[in-house]
Image (cartoon, rainbow, N blue to C red):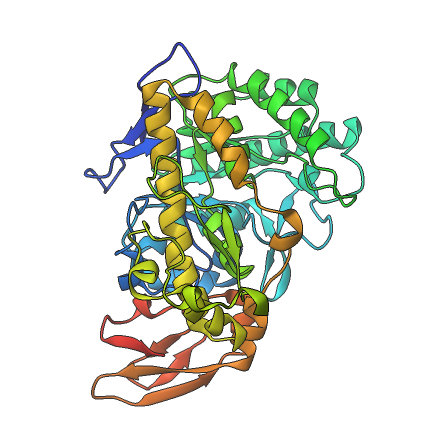
Amino acid sequence: MKFKPSRRDGLPRIGCISQIDNYPDVNFTTPNCLLYTKFGAVPFLTNDIVKQIYGLPNLTFASLNFLRERFKVFRKFGKGLAQYSGLGIPVILFQNDPTEAAVTRAVDKTSIQVWAVGGRLPVTMEQYADCVVNALPVAFQMPVDNETSFPDSTAPTKKRCQKSVQRTRSYASMLEEIVASNEKLQKIPPLISVAGGNDLDQRLRGITSVDFSRASGIVLDGFFHESLEGDRSSHLETVFSILSSVCSRFPPHLPRFLTNLWQPDEVVRACLCGVDLFDGSLPFRLTRSGIAWLYTAYRKDMVSSAWICFPLQAEDLKAEVYRQPMQPDCPCFACQRHNQGYVSHLHSVKEMLAHILLMIHNSTQCYAFFADLRQAIADGRVDEFAEMSKAHHFPEDLLHIDLTIKTIQNGDFCLVNDGGPTLSLTTQYLADTHCLPGVDLHTGCMDPYSYHLGCHSPDVVMGL
């Protein structure tokens, strides 16, 4: 996997990732976001729907927690996560899911911790290597002590930031010994993890001790900006200041990945600091909170608000909402076929279709946002774009709401196989996965290790 920036003398950067092993036709332009997945699938959506979304990224974000919990399944499957998911899109493997906060701090000298459906799982370096080999990603994040990002009332101390650098370096040394004796792992390029919390000195110390010669990219991890006291602004200023300093010291031919930063205006600021790629979790975050993104940059039809919150309030349920889509100029399936009133009704009665339609719309808007960001950089209008993006900062209190749990717990849905059984499944456990279960078409039984329809057959459809 190679990254070629089109400009080396200034920020923000525009570039292209190409020459990906086993995917020679994939070219991924930056700045951009990855196709975010949970448990190997795009949340709420089946594969046939995913492939119809405008501007779909052709690199996938996946996290280690699902692989660690289903290790035996992936080892027996033997074809990697891209084939297991049914999407066939190259996968980049990261240590943690940015939408799943750790319950407590639990790293130690020899293992990291991931949080899966079954709870906390320790991952030794040997297990980490096995998960990477079984996932067959096109690149993987090196293990990191990133608990400096743990939500707290205050930022981590200098000593804690220093420990994160030491442990990250120790993890890398242990994993490099395993790589030296594992031919399969040697063929998978690593993404170097840079730790150190919000301490610039420790970040720079971590950089000086890293050998970038074998790396295919850099992951900036462990930033603290989620204060329990609700004041993010001061911590974010520190984060952006550190990003500017450390990005100037990275080799220019390596793409820089940043996870757990997803507000549109913050994404633009990170790009101005030198970041190239983001986790792509914003559509999922908005959808589970019942928010439709009305992204309007460089569009003819402007609207008064940057989002709609569903279900609509009673005073907003006027006749026109049953004649208007969520966004008139949006090309997505949800806006072309359905109106605001119908989407609001689906949320009111807790139908899972509400989140499916919202995920289609929010994904379309998110990918359009990154396309416009790249165009703004190319046209020299990035400052104007950054100012525009401030209107698209979503309220933190709204995004802490999760509407999907009640929806999925209260509703049953059918999985229909042509010529086979029709199954009505109570989906209590889906509250943890936000994905559809798989079905063994030979037995008609639910497969607890598959979380979406694409794993088995395109003949399976969802009856709603």
Res. 449 visible in picture: no
Q: Residue furthest top?
A: 9
Residue 127 position, x and y percent, is 53, 51
Is 341 located above or below residue 369 in the figure?
below
Q: Is residue 303 left or right of residue 396?
A: left
Q: How many marks?
A: 0
Q: Nearer the viewer, residue 355 or 120?
A: 355
Q: Residue furthest front?
A: 319
Q: Is residue 100 left or right of residue 463?
A: right
Is 356 located above or below residue 369 in the figure?
below
Q: Quadrant of the N terminus?
A: top left
Residue drawn at 73 percent across, 27 percent down? 162
Residue 432 position, x and y percent, is 56, 67
Is 396 located above or below residue 298 in the figure?
below
Residue drawn at 53 percent across, 55 percent down? 65
Query: Which quadrant of the view contains residue 50?
Result: bottom left
Is 457 located above or below residue 96 in the figure?
below
Residue drawn at 45 percent across, 33 percent down? 191
Q: Is residue 406 left or right of residue 46?
A: right
Q: Quadrant of the C terminus?
A: bottom left
Res. 106 visible in picture: yes
Residue 371 position, x and y percent, is 33, 35
Q: Nearer the viewer, residue 266 or 26?
A: 266
Residue drawn at 59 percent across, 51 percent down? 123
Residue 303 position, x and y percent, is 44, 46
Q: Nearer the viewer, residue 41 or 234?
A: 234
